[in-house]
Image (cartoon, helix red, strand yellow):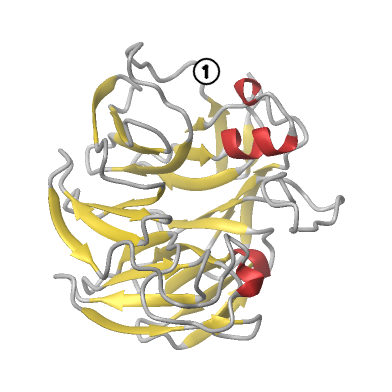
Amino acid sequence: MATVGSGDFVYEPAVDWFHLPPDVPLTEAVGVAVDSADNLYVFNRADPPIIVFDPAGNYLRHWGAGHFVRPHGIWIDEDDTLYLTDDVGHSMRQFTPEGELICTFGPVNQPSPTNVVGFDYRKITHGDAPYNLPTNTVKAPNGDVYVADGYGNARIHRFAPTGEYKTSWGEPGSGPGQFNLPHGLGFDRAGRLYVGDRENSRIQIFSLEGEFIEEWTDVVRPCQVFVAQDGFVYVGELGRKAGMFDWLERDSNAPGARVSIFDQAGQLQARWGGGTHPESLEDLYTGHDVCVDSQGNVYVGEVSLSAAKAAGVNPETIPTLRKFVRV
């Protein structure tokens, strides 16, 4: 098996590594996250919405049927609490690992009036209150919770740990503190918030208070930003147009989906993918989410079903859930 990555970050793609009962379908792994025991939680865009595997890929349990309109973002904190973002359901809720609802952050299914049309972020006229097609969630070192409100809004919302709304920032645009589809979020231990500003092809970095610090531009449509325990920043990039939205015109010479690893100074450490051979275990097609376990293994969730169908490609030939084992 060929390896991917480079330098201190070399991985072997896992083969047939997870196992499911016949009656538990994994349709589209839109989100991935690991708990304190390195169990993998997959946010599945179908029923069941949550599928849990142990570190060896053995099926543990599933839950969540009927709770979500369209699964999108998943994040797990240090206490193994799940934060689940439902884009079409216009909501973000907190659950136990067994699926018990703990808290709802903000309204549910009450889209804010941003004048968006469908998922076309270009139609958004202004940033507004939570939510309109939110994308992802992360908890800060101080316990506050931040939600990216991306497809139908252009804002980051901040909540207290117990769910009370605090503040928001962001407007449509490409300047500092503006967004064209804020999609993925991550925090480092210093309290810096990384925002994958997807359609601006950059990562913006902010303070806890939403003050702009800097931006990184060596990315192509970043979908998720995951800060690992060792402080390195893993970015899942969607890459050039994958066929999902006809109005997204992309440079055909731009790279396709990939994973990029940066240090906290923004220096690239390793990168793989590119979308040339998406059916290959060494490549990617539509990297939508990325997470890293305590052993340094990388999981990638891909929206391969949505993209492949739109592009006229057989989705059965392209994995939706990938694992790269650190070597």
Residue at 67 percent of width and 34 percent of height: 308
Location of residue 210 (image quadrant): bottom left
Q: Position of residue 228 (x, y in %)?
A: 40, 54
Can you identify the residue that label 1 sits on? 15
Q: Position of residue 209 (x, y in %)?
A: 36, 86
Q: Quadrant of the N terminus?
A: top right
Q: Is residue 270 visible?
A: yes
Q: Nearer the viewer, residue 231 or 213?
A: 213
- Examine the rendered structure and indicate whether residue 30 appears above or below residue 278: below
- Examine the rendered structure and indicate whether residue 16 appears above or below residue 11: above
Q: Is residue 145 left or right of residue 132?
A: left
Residue at 28 percent of width and 34 percent of height: 39
- Examine the rendered structure and indicate whether residue 10 appears above or below residue 177: above
Location of residue 227 (image quadrant): bottom left
Q: Is residue 216 visible?
A: no
Q: Position of residue 161 (x, y in %)?
A: 18, 70
